[in-house]
Image (cartoon, grey):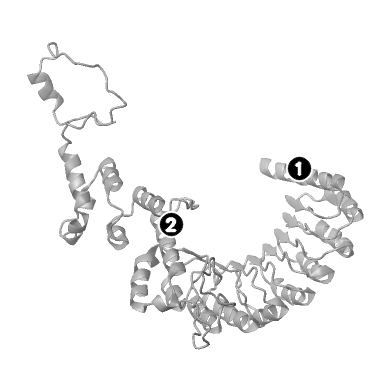
Amino acid sequence: MKYPNTVDKNALKAYIDLRVVRRQKDGLNSLDLKWNFDSPESLKILCIEALAENWTECLEIVAANPVYSEVIFSVDRNYLLDILSLNLSVADLSAKIQDDVFWERFFMSKWPHCYPQTKNRPWIKVFMEKYLAEKLENMKSDEYEEESMVQLLELCAPHTENLVLNQLQPTMSPDPEHNDHVIPLNLVLSNLYELRKLDLTFDLKSVGTTFYLGCANISTNDIKSLTEGLAKCFELQDFRLHSSKLDAEMLKLLAVALDKGCPNLEILSLPHCRFGDGGLLAFLEALGPDSLPNIRTLILTNNFLSSNGILELSKVIKRRKIQKLDLRLNPIKSDGAFAIFGILRHMHVKELNLSCCSLDDEISFLFIKTLKECKFLEKLNLSVNRFSHEMGEKITEIMPQITNLLEFDLRNTDVSTISRMIIDDYVLKNRLKKNSS
């Protein structure tokens, strides 16, 4: 609630005798929303409202008269940002306004059902990243214009650190002459000089009525355009490409681009890309002995990998400082698990996921030995595998010696409920001990 302040208190005391003034009511009616309708606003409020109504005209003279910067008090500036129209162009707004209070309001107005995890990040960055992603996700290849794309990137690039593309619009034409299925990403990525994270898929959420089988598949030209852009993303730390079918040639191009342009890459995630052992071998062969030295997280979920591919993978990653390895939903079987367990003793892996990997009791001896020797492993997932009751008992026998394990998932196995409860109890004690220290 605001009170009229057009009359100075000293003037009120000088010209009005409060003893003879009879007030009709001692309070205000809270249900009357127009109680101050006939009270004139202060000159300050009128000036701020005029500035908001004529924002575009003010920008034309802003170089000679920086009006917005002259609004000194934060309460006045916040009022201006609260009433400023959201129908103005994003370019005009971002040129002069950096305040979180405005960009949060703009974001919630434009995407009311989206709740981003800001993590103390400036709201203008969150807005620009979502704004750019929405433009790219809905842009069709026949609508792509280089000039307009350059203008969009000039607007968003200074604020874009994370780019998440949940779909790309394909060319809905089975004509083989249309080799570019989606918009070219080389221009986009090469101009995002602050990009730290790239998460994309060439899949499509809704194909509509003009689709044909394979319309959302990634083409050779698409991957070439992507890798040309990746080769210039020198600040990239997190690369995720998911739900996109890749072949061996595409994986080779991808490996060369990441090795050339992303020396600071820490997270590599390629889940649900269905490239098999052939694609994995092509990717590994394209890497040199010193390639991707800073890689910390490797996610290869559901890629039809067998023990042969995992054996070659283990030879490469044992020379890297991998802390998280996710191989779930790959039928690597016991031989693949042996390859992984064989290198764990020489690595500082903290999180290992071998869920649904067709493992059985054949790995029990080496697994028990590895569990005793790996003092850095904190999270282990072996759920949805064919482990027997006897293996569960062997694990419970050594659990008093395992003080580093903080999470151990054995759900959907034949390990008995009693054994799982005992294991969970030891794991809980480890967590409590670590939290208290």
* Other-residue count near label 2 (Cα within 10 Å), few / some / many at <14 / 14–19 / ≥20: many
Please indicate whether residue 193 sits to the left or right of residue 151 in the image: right
Task: Quarter of the image for the C terminus: give it.
Answer: top right
**Between residues 357 and 136, which one lies in front from this camera angle?**
136
**Real-space CA distance between mark 1 and mark 2, rounded to the nearest whole angstrom:** 39 Å
Image-quadrant location for residue 77: top left
Please indicate whether residue 112 sits to the left or right of residue 68 in the image: right
Residue 107 on image: x %, y %: 40, 53
**Which residue of the protein is positioned furthest toward the front in this rendering?**
209
> Marks 1 and 2: which is nearer the front?
2
Question: Which amino acid, by three-letter code, is at mark 2?
Answer: Val
Which residue is drawn at the image coordinates 46% and 50% (left, top)?
120
Against 330, residue 401 (above or below) is above
Which residue is drawn at the image coordinates 45% and 73% (left, top)?
189
Image-quadrant location for residue 18: top left
**Between residues 138 and 189, which one lies in front from this camera angle?**
138
* Other-residue count near label 1 (Cα within 10 Å), few / some / many at <14 / 14–19 / ≥20: some
Determine which residue is flagged by label 2. Answer: 126
Residue 137 on image: x %, y %: 46, 68
Question: Which amino acid, by three-letter code, is at mark 1?
Answer: Lys
Against 141, residue 355 (above or below) is above
Which residue is drawn at the image coordinates 43% and 50% (left, top)?
112
Against 179, residue 265 (above or below) is above
**Which residue of the protein is positioned furthest toward the right in this rendering?**
390
Please indicate whether residue 430 sits to the left or right of residue 28 in the image: right
